[in-house]
Amino acid sequence: MVLKIVQAGEPVLRQRARELTPEEIGSEDTRRLIQLMRDTMRDAPGVGLAAPQVGVGLRLVVIEDRAEYQAGASPADLALRERAPVAFHVLINPKLVVEDPTPMEFHEGCLSVNGLAALVARARGVRVEALDENGQPVTVSARGWYARIIQHELDHLDGTLYVDRMETRSLTTQENHRRHWLGKSTAQVRTALGLPEQTPSLPRKDPT
């Protein structure tokens, strides 16, 4: 069984999700929600899913970047994005700290903005303090693509979509991204789109 992934325009995607209580974290309902979110993410497929994306306004995300998702990318492309497999894990009531603010800009999509992608700048390195599915404290340090996934999913908990951070001129359908931009560097994409060559500044984001 999988859940419906709500799309841009649903109010839940624009609302700040609330923290789970200790009682909720240990409940059967939350365990079931985590299982369903995991199955829904894998079915999509995607590398992360936040509870608001399935219509639930809770500060809960699941993340997994499987090796099979990276099979079509070249070693050079994976190295450029600093992308490697990430095992399935759960983050509850997460708090984000930017450790390396160096902006990394690549095309990014979202399961709740179906069929589109755009250039988005994200911090290269972050740290997250959170609880796992058992309510135990966890600290996650991430760089590169893993850091991008975390920032994207945690944005959902604050009612933010990648379209709020994107380079608007770069918005493309996924099909056109594959046809025209896949395999090209960000600099090449920016030049082709008539955008400045310099790396854009990151939007300010306070720890939450």
Image (cartoon, rainbow, N blue to C red):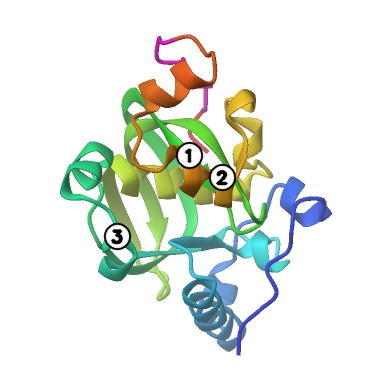
Report if the CB atoms under discs 1 and 2 are less than 8 Å apart: yes
From the image, which quarter does the N terminus lie in?
bottom right
At 64% across and 26% down in the image, what residue appears? 168
Quarter-of-image position of residue 158 = top right
Q: Is residue 157 above or below residue 206?
A: below
Camera-side residue of 1 and 35: 1
Magenta residues (range): 197-205
Give the number of callouts: 3
**SS at mark 1?**
helix
Please state the horizontal and vertical placement of residue 126, each as a whole percent of the image. Answer: 33, 38
Give the amino acid at mark 3. Gly
Q: Which residue is mark 2?
A: 176
Q: Which residue is mark 3?
A: 72
Give the amino acid at mark 1. His
At 47% across and 75% down in the image, what residue appears? 42
Camera-side residue of 86 and 43: 43
